[in-house]
């Protein structure tokens, strides 16, 4: 521990680990690692997703409880699921880890129209999947959002 300018003890924060992932869904494992090691908060995170694909598909086979009960098994189940690597973001939203997702994409990627959807799109995809949204007023929020499950993923 180093001394601060006033002679008091100065705590050093450990560096935030950086992970480079071959497959998109590995990022969910890295997020869980950061949470377990107290490198990132458990909830309320914002994510910037740089990709030509939104990766906002929702599993139609994985039980929602798995996200909360056993994140490692949830990651394995998502990898084995038909949607594969395209459905790793919504489980993190469902678990409360992600508060907002910003999708930065090339101009030619038009799976989702430009706009600010808030929770609309995520909740619609969650409604169509086995994952159930945690908000009680989800029915009021779901009108007019695109359905990511029909995006061919």
Image (cartoon, grey):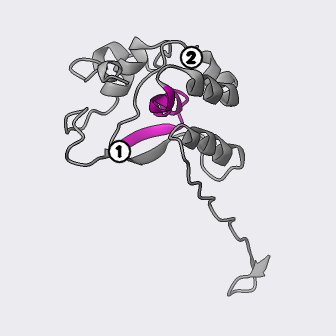
- Residue in the image at 80% along x and 76% along y: 1
Q: Is residue 45 left or right of residue 11?
A: left
Q: Residue at x 64, y 40 (%)?
A: 32
Residue 136 rendering spot, x and y as whole percentages: 43, 16
Question: What is the secondary structure assignment of the residue under circle 2?
Answer: loop
50 sits to left or right of 89: left
The residue positioned 65% from the left and 53% from the top of the image is 39
Circle 2 packing at 10 Å, graded few (<14), some (14-19), many (20+), is many
Q: Which residues are magenta?
A: 84-102
Q: Return the x and y of residue 90 as percentages of the image width and height.
A: 46, 29
Residue 4 location, x and y as percent? 70, 83
Question: Which of 20 and 38 lies nearest the eye of the viewer?
Answer: 20
Side of 57 where 118 appears, left or right: left
Circle nearer the N terminus (1, 2): 2
Q: Report the front residue among 76 and 16.
A: 76
- In percent of the image, x 68 and y 87: which residue is there? 5
Residue 89 inside the magenta-drawn segment: yes
Nearer-the-camera pick, 21 or 115: 21
- In the picture, measured across the screen, residue 4 lies left or right of residue 49, that is right
Question: Which quadrant is home to the C terminus?
Answer: top left
**Quarter occupied by residue 7:** bottom right
Numbered label attached to residue 102 = 1
The answer to if 98 sits in the magenta stretch is: yes
> Is there a contact, CB below 8 Å, between mark 1 and mark 2?
no
Reply above or below: 57 against 35. Answer: above
Marking on residue 64:
2
Q: CA distance from mark 1 to mark 2?
A: 23 Å
Residue 131 is labelled as none
């Amino acid at each position: 521990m180093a001394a601060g300018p006033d002679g008091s003890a100065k705590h050093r924060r450990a560096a935030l680990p950086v992970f480079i992932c071959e497959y998109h869904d590995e990022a969910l494992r890295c997020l869980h690692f950061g949470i377990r090691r107290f490198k990132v908060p458990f909830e309320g995170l914002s994510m910037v997703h740089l990709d030509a694909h939104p990766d906002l598909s929702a599993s139609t086979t994985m039980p929602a409880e798995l996200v909360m009960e056993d994140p490692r098994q949830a990651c394995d189940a998502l990898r084995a699921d038909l949607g594969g690597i395209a459905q790793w973001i919504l489980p993190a939203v469902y678990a409360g880890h992600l508060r907002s997702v910003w999708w930065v994409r090339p101009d030619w990627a038009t799976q989702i129209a430009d706009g600010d959807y808030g929770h609309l799109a995520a909740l619609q995809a969650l409604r169509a999947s086995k994952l159930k949204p945690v908000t009680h007023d989800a029915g009021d929020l779901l009108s007019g959002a695109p359905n990511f499950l029909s995006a061919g993923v």
